[in-house]
Image (spheres, rainbow, N blue to C red):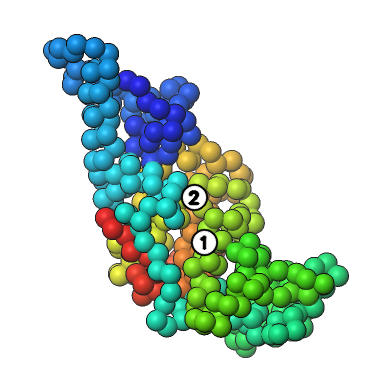
Amino acid sequence: MNIGRNDPCPCGSGKKYKNCCFGKLDDKTSADALQDIMAEVRDKLEGGKFSSLAETQAVVDTFMQRNNSATLARFHGLSPEQMHRLLYFPFATPSLIRFAADFSQPPEAPALTLFALLVDAIGEKGLKSTAKGNLPQSFCNDAARAFWGKEKYEKHIGFATICSEMDFFEMHCLRLAAEQAGLLRKYKEKFILSVQCREKITSHGTGAIYPDLFMAYVKKFNWAYRYGHQEIPFIQQSFLFTLFLLSKYGETPRPRSFYEDIFLKAFPDLLHEIEEVSYQSVGETLRNAYFYRTLSDCAEFFGLAELQAISDDAILSCYEVKKLPLLDQFISFVI
């Protein structure tokens, strides 16, 4: 069986073969998956009469195409081929995923609320940066009060005050993503809006930059920077699979473990890439990274999901997750 390095891996992971089972036949899970498929191919070819190697290869190729097009239970209705498109071509597969380019009403999302505060502060004259190139302390302090509200602000800061952009980390991350999106830049020691950004806001309002901000956040901004600890880039790469799950199951509030369980069952080999730490298992490390980076720092930050605490125990971090209307307004899954 001839599997191309860039073909979807026949084990059904959704990854490219070269990034999954290629060269990993000593891994039992991958080896068993490949052996099962090889056995199916042998059964398919057994007793057949083929006039040439090309004819034999054509039969194998047809079988592989059917195998990759069949839906898998662990992918919840997606085929390996569809998963491959979601992972590697999230913004270039209109046959499966469509993103809204504009909105009849400005989206309600924390990320956009923060950006609106920044736009107002920049105005026509720009916003002077600090010596380190960050947003000024006075702006961050006022913006944090407006964004968090009095009660949450006091809970975060106590009797102190925000001393730098890093103390208002949501704004810090938003500022970085806005720069990566080409919406914001520095000029002569001031933060200013790009020409493209001003034109979009003038013509269509602040909501017009939501798709640009979202795309930069999922494609360019490093999620591990916001959460810290291990990189685990595949969590970010699989963002669209989680949004697909939210679109499918998110009407009903469900515990965070519901989505964590699906993610771990869909990509079990990812556990082998997690570094062991003394204070939690590799499974807990992966679950926490997945929850905070995907569901909290992405889906909630962009107004696509709501996280409701169902326990006062901060250590256990018990949450229920529910999709918000913006998810279906912004993303259409044609599956």
For mark 1, what is the residue?
Answer: 215
Q: How far apart are marks 1 and 2 (CA)?
A: 12 Å
Can you say which quadrant of the picture contains the C terminus? bottom left
Of circles 1 and 2, the one toward us is 1
Local secondary structure at mark 1: helix
Say which residue appears at 78% left-offset and 75% top-offset.
Answer: 190
Residue 135: image quadrant is: bottom right
Secondary structure beneath dot 2 equals: helix
Hey, which quadrant is residue 97 in on the image?
bottom left
On the image, numbered disc 2 is attached to which residue?
Answer: 237
- Quarter placement of the N terminus: top left
Q: Can residue 184 be seen by looking at this rendering?
A: yes
**Amino acid at pointer 2:** Gln
Task: Describe residue 105's horizontal placement relative to residue 51 as left or right.
Answer: right
User: Is 251 on the left-hand or right-hand side of 182?
Assistant: left
Q: Nearer the viewer, residue 143 or 206?
A: 206
Q: In this view, does 186 lie to the left or right of 184?
A: right
Depth check, front residue: 135 or 54: 54
Q: Residue furthest right?
A: 131
Give the label on residue 177, or none.
none
- In x, y percent, where is residue 295? 47, 62
The residue closer to the viewer here, 18 or 254, is 18
Q: Compare marks 1 and 2 and give the one earlier in the sequence.
A: 1
